[in-house]
Amino acid sequence: MRFNTVFPVLLIFLGLLHPFHPVYPQNKSEDNSKELQEALRYLQDKALEVQIHARLIGKDDENIWNTQSRKITVSGKSVSITLEGEDLTVKAHLIPFLNEGGAIFLVAKGEVWVQQSASQEKKYYSTVKSLPIKPGESVIFFPTGVLMDTEENNIYTIELEIQVEPLE
Amino acid sequence: MCYDEQIISAYVDGELEGPLSTEVKKHIESCRRCRSLAAEFSAISEVFTAVRSADSIDSDQRKARVWQGIRRQTNRETVQNFWHRRVQIPLPLAAGVVIAVAALVFTLIVNPFSSNHRGTPIALEQDKAMDTTIPAVPSDFTSPGNTIPELEQLVRFLSDQGAAIEVKIELPSSSKIQVSGEPQLLRAADLRRDEIE
Amino acid sequence: MKIFSNDPKAFQSVYDKTFHTIVRVAYHITLDAEVAEDICQEAFIRFYHRTIPFPSEDQARYWLIRVAKNLSFNYYKRKKREKSALERYSYEPKAHERNGEELLLRSETEKIVHRAVERLPHSLRSVIVLKEYGNLSYREIGKVLHITENNVKVRVHRARNMLGTLLKEEEAHVL
């Protein structure tokens, strides 16, 4: 990976700085239940709900297929969506960061493995995008790019509509 | 036979194609009901035409003012933004920074909530067999707004040593996906297909 | 020909062809001239930042109108939530102009029309605003809203039927 801007470098530092998730001690006795409460409350403050609507979009923005999922994560922990097709695998890694003010910063990494035809070798693409977002605001990630105008029918693009909110 | 009201409405807007438009026009001339309908639709449209011609919102001064505002904003943004500047970090400096950060991380991972393991990096706990039984959440912890299933899900994934939460979706067979151009992350408001309800 | 929004010539051309439409649409949804200007500015700045080229100038225009419409309705909904029910039915559109320009004079009929349009369901209101204030064709409205021309025709007709009733209720002398 080329680091040609400050921002990805800073993200990596932030990732390193992010405290490891505290694992509650094994064999917790009742004497430690208060610590457990504190731990769980700490986690809950950092917890985020990620809603994902995955769609296949065809010509003229036709909605061919869709599915949705809801996952709970914490600030800095990735939600990874793998979409398996016949000749293609797409992985979208969504990492939401929550700051103390309640603002959310979303990092989306897309990885695509595609084999356009049997005679061609498998190609790999990867990119990282990021955006500050408001809680509940819809953002759309196109891991395979935006569908360009095409005369062909039955050509689709993948669209992931994402909403991130603090878990309440 | 009378035409559908939608056709009359489209005729009033000049949206019908030549032959059909001529036929509808002929019909309206001889049909009182359709003529009255066309007049009603026309009158409503004319009210808006009057409103449009009365307002001065679309003035040259306003157009110039907005243009200046756009130029000011976009000129400001072409000034190099620190966060997106190209940076070359000399290797020794980079190594020094990484070591410093690693030291900071080492101190941070001391878990303040784990009195039994004070001073022990949690990462080293991986080798121990983990008790994955979720303990009962103390009853005085559950307060309005905390749903136990979600807390369990949260705690469960923390026990999981996996790097990320996984969602696996199988695409419909025979879907030809176009891989074109750079992946994009955009606000839905910029792309909204259906109207906002 | 693809349109790259950060190409100055392309940007100017789209601005000249689209400004009048989106400022009217924004104004007649928000009823605030200053807000309409801000929305126009925001829409064009977003256009400037868009990295995906548009297949044609028309597509760029439709995209801009859609963004401006969405921003306007967002503002309108936010304001509606803030206003009390009493204020909603006795509002005065904020027509005050900056830089000492004349206050817009609004006739009683215009206020009645605005109130009637406000009472339309959202899906019909969008179509009527784009058609009657934006002066767009059915085809253009379909492109902006991503619906078929036939759907536009149906919605325009329904909106007119409702407006006929609403305007009579608002005691406007339309007929």
Image: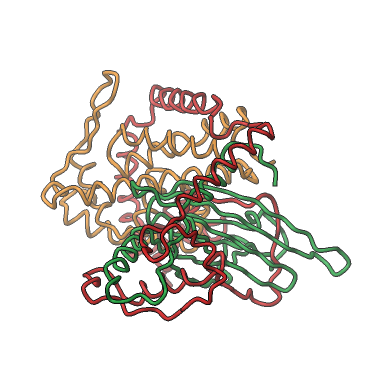
Chain colours: A green, B red, C orange
Q: Quadrant of residue A47?
A: bottom left
Image position, residue B184 (x, y; %): 59, 51
Can see residue C156?
no
- Give me the residue at 30% from left, 56% from top: B40
- Give me the residue at 60% from left, 27% from top: C8
Decide which of C74, B109 is in the foreground and name it.
B109
Image position, residue A45 (x, y; %): 33, 59
Q: Is residue B31 left or right of residue C76?
A: right
Can see residue A120?
yes
* Image vertical order of residue B86 relative to residue B170, above or below: above
Q: Hey, which residue is sitting farthest left in the picture?
A: C86
- Give me the residue at 61% from left, 37% from top: B96
Q: Quadrant of residue A88?
A: bottom right
Decide which of C60, A54 is in the foreground and name it.
A54
Image position, residue A23 (x, y; %): 43, 66
Image position, residue B72 (x, y; %): 46, 23
Decide which of A97, C14 is in the foreground and name it.
A97
Q: Is residue B185 left or right of residue C131?
A: right
* Image vertical order of residue A105 relative to residue C99, above or below: below
Decide which of C25, B78 is in the foreground and name it.
B78
Q: Hey, which residue is sitting farthest top in the picture?
A: C100
* Image vertical order of residue C50 relative to residue A30, above or below: above
